[in-house]
Image (cartoon, rainbow, N blue to C red):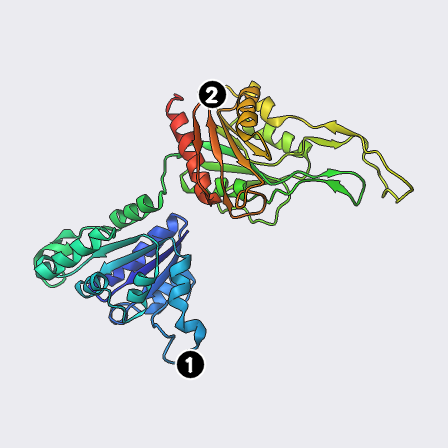
Amino acid sequence: MRIALGVSGGVAAYKAAELVRRLQQEKLDVQVVMTRGAREFVTPLTFAALTGKKVITELFGEKETQANVESAIEHIAVAQRIDLLVVAPATADILAKLANGIADDFLTTLYLATKAPVIVAPAMNVNMWEHPATRKNIETLRARGVRVVEPDEGYLACGMVGPGRLAGIEAIAGAVCETLGLRHDLEGLTLVVTAGPTVEDIDPVRVLTNRSSGKMGYALADAATRRGAHVILISGPTDLHPPNEVDWAPVRTTEEMHRAVRERAGAADVVIMAAAVSDYRPASPETKKIKRGEGRMMLELEPTADILAELGRDKGRKILVGFAAETDRLAENARHKLAAKGADIIVANDVTQEGAGFDTDTNIVTLFLRGGRDVALPKMSKFNVANRILDHVAELRKGVK
């Protein structure tokens, strides 16, 4: 998830470097934007070294380089790709500009251009914080939905004592996590997640497979890791890179996936079967390429192992989540699968819907839960779908002692 961190010109600007590190611990991609005043306290090089990214300091590009169309609309590009804008520290000046729609630099223009949630963490002299103008600006921003992380009280850089000191890094990071829906409710749990397709050989050059990209399973692995779980990702062939900090086990065939799941499921608290496993394989794969002949050719298939049903029969206290990609009778098929496989949740989607099929970045699913409850989700990113699934996993885990 992408965060824009706006740093404005107060002495607390140096604390923004610590905030960058803290947000990175949450696996957030941080883009720093600095005002001209902020550069009087901290150099852009500090944040560039921490983030590995160019720090944005000018609305129309750096003074040393010639402005172009790309630099002129960079604020729009950043505004469209971020999931959250955080301004810390937020000075009295920047709060006044945000409240009154003044867009005279990159940060204030970004604020007007983005539809993402906004968090501000004020830091200033106590008298400035308590001034009626500042109080009105804070009220205006809150009324617009901006989240304000109140400053702490204490000894200020100016020598005065009172409210105005930048809130603690943990308080700001906590507001970020809460706004983005990031949690740590899976700490101490081991999750096995399967992803991608499996591949069955017909001959040395031809295979049976399916259109699964693996994106849903990889999103689940990423989201579960962010929520504190130890994740084992068993993946069929995909073009995706496994998320950091997961144990990645690549497989190819259904039998290899079956063996990998069987070896690892015993130590798992939760198993999520998001892979599109082949239900059939050629009964007798050819050792040489099949040559073209006259007329039709018959291909005999045999069933593969039903991994989900096997897990359901012997799951004990595990939470078991299965997937159902359907083209018709979605509810009927999903409820049947929920009961037949012994699962706790079946995540079903109609792959004929736009935005819900294979190799998309979004999904439209219904969760069929043990006990008869159904939860229909609107179209959303696969990462957000993953978190909604994990919300229900966490709820089920509360009943497992």
Q: Quadrant of residue 86?
A: bottom left
Q: Residue at x 74, y 32 (%)?
A: 281
Q: Which percent across, then down, holds residue 182?
A: 36, 43
SS of the residue under disc 1: loop
Q: Is residue 24 above or below residue 390?
A: below
What amino acid is found at the position of numbered circle 2 in the picture? Arg
Cα–Cα span, label 2 and label 1 = 63 Å
**Residue corresponding to mark 1:** 66
Q: Nearer the viewer, residue 293 or 27?
A: 293
206 left or right, relative to 275: right
Structural crowding at the residue carrying mark 1, measured as other residues with C-alpha within 10 Å and reported as few (<14), some (14–19) or many (≥20)? few
Q: Which percent across, then down, holds residue 285?
A: 81, 35
**Residue corresponding to mark 2:** 317
Does residue 72 appear anywhere in the picture? yes
294 left or right, relative to 299: right
Residue 294 shows which numbered tag? none
154 left or right, relative to 214: left
Q: Residue at x 57, y 26 (%)?
A: 333
Q: Is residue 55 above or below residue 210?
A: below
Q: Which percent across, then down, holds residue 42?
A: 28, 67
SS of the residue under disc 2: loop
What amino acid is found at the position of numbered circle 1 in the picture? Gln
Q: Residue at x 61, y 50 (%)?
A: 239
Q: Which percent across, then down, holds residue 293?
A: 91, 42
Q: Quadrant of residue 66?
A: bottom left
Does residue 224 appear anywhere in the picture? no
Q: Earlier in the sequence, mark 2 or mark 1?
A: 1
**Contact (Cβ within 8 Å) of mark 2 with mark 1:** no
Q: Nearer the viewer, residue 322 or 53?
A: 322
Q: Nearer the viewer, mark 2 or mark 1?
A: 1
